[in-house]
Amino acid sequence: MKKLLITSEQLVNPSNGQCARYQVCAVYEDDRMIEVELHQADTETILNNIYVARVKSVAANLNAAFVEIAKGKVCYLPLEDLKQPLFTKKLSKKRIAEGEELVVQVAKEAVKTKDAVVTTNLSFSGEYLLLTSANCRIGISGKISGRERIRLQAFAQKLLEENEDIQKCFGLIFRTNAAQAEEAVIREEFLKLKSEYETVTVYAASRTVYSCLRKEQPFYLKMLMDAEKATLEEVVTDEIMVFEELEAVSCGNFSVRFYEDRLLSLAKLYHIAGQIEAALKPRVWLKSGANIVIEQTEALTVIDINSGKNIAKKDKQQNHYKINLEAAKEIAFQLRLRNLSGIIVVDFIDLYEDAWKQSLMEQLRSLLRKDPVPTNLIDMTKLGLVEITRKKKKKPLLEQVGN
């Protein structure tokens, strides 16, 4: 079973050695951190916030527009995302023009020299459902299968019949947590999300440019909402305001506990700083004595497997196969812990027998399927490099500490 910890801790930025205090939300399994998100204390995130923005310019060559969500705060709007946009001020018959005002949601925060990215596809996320304003369809998580998928498909059809105009306005996606959830509970959340969507769309018409129509809930509440409730045993925090929030929204079979030991902080009890420090280092040692090296670049992430201290004089290929299997398990773990995304290229130790290569790929594919974030094993190239893609949902851990 898993625990979700919410606390604060002083952490060191590995790129410049500077210390800062962060609010930490981490998922633990058997005392090992398997997922973590950090937000620097006293800094506000704009991710998922919804604004009335003004079009500053349209770049036809980039198939994009640059919009301001605040005076001087420019964001990038891909025109391919311009589906069913909600304009609050339309000046021309063009698809989009300079000076026009429309409702956007922040999809990605600014990173280094790159502007924040916004979209006109507004999304409202709940524990069981995701409501989207542009993708007018009914979808069900790929992790739900069998009878439960059939049940939810039938329930989705029932919702459609109850709300005939649903597909004209927005789409719904049933999340993994919808599995085994009661229809009454899902319907209640649907009505809540629908109300939030309608409130924003009505509210937007009377608001001035740069208005923030909706702020995203605190990241730890969102992380709790995204957690697999069936395997979550307990939520623990040592911050009283967070505890009160959790008690107000708590649902499910897990318990919520306030940690009060003043002699040993929650962060120290679970070795949070040490585990995050290890997750920021490029080299990870395996029990066999081998190691993997993880290098992040702007374009992709490269992972190299080295036999290291594991030197076999006999049956080298069999030994390499065992190291690769051990590395595959650790790679699947590190992708989630470090929140690596985009293109990931893995250079395993060379295997010459096709049967061993195929077995390795099958094992890795099975491990990646367990990741709650969509992760795909593409193929092994002729050079023996394994290609993986992982959907980007939030910043990599290295960027979260301010690198």
Image (cartoon, rainbow, N blue to C red):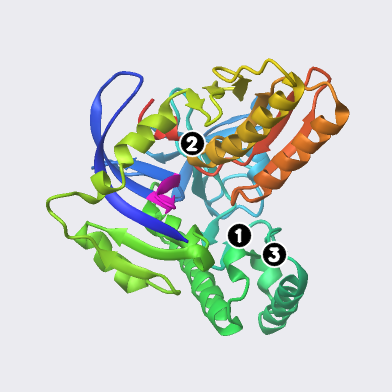
- Residue at 75% in and 35% down: 360
Predominant SS along the magenta part: strand
Q: Quadrant of the C terminus?
A: top left
**Amino acid type assigned to the residue bearing label 3 in the image:** Ile
Residue 144: mark in rendering: 3
Q: Tell which circle, 1 or 2, labels the residue nearer the N-terminal end.
A: 1
What element does badge 3 sit on?
Answer: loop
Residues packed near mark 1 inside 10 Å, few (<14), some (14 to 19) or many (20 plus) = many
Magenta stretch?
26-35
Q: Toward which corner of the image does residue 256 lie, by quadrant? A: bottom left
Q: Is residue 211 above or below residue 199?
A: above
**Amino acid type assigned to the residue bearing label 1 in the image:** Thr
Q: Is residue 83 left or right of residue 21?
A: right
What residue is pinned by disc 1? 132
Viewer-proximal residue among 337 and 20: 337
Q: Is residue 248 left or right of residue 177?
A: left
Q: CA distance from mark 3 to mark 1?
A: 20 Å
Q: Tell which circle, 3 or 2, labels the residue nearer the N-terminal end.
A: 3
Q: Is residue 59 above or below residue 22?
A: above
Q: Tell which circle, 3 or 1, labels the residue nearer the N-terminal end.
A: 1
What residue is pinned by disc 2? 338
Viewer-proximal residue among 186 and 367: 367
Residue 183 x, y percent position in the rendering:
61, 82
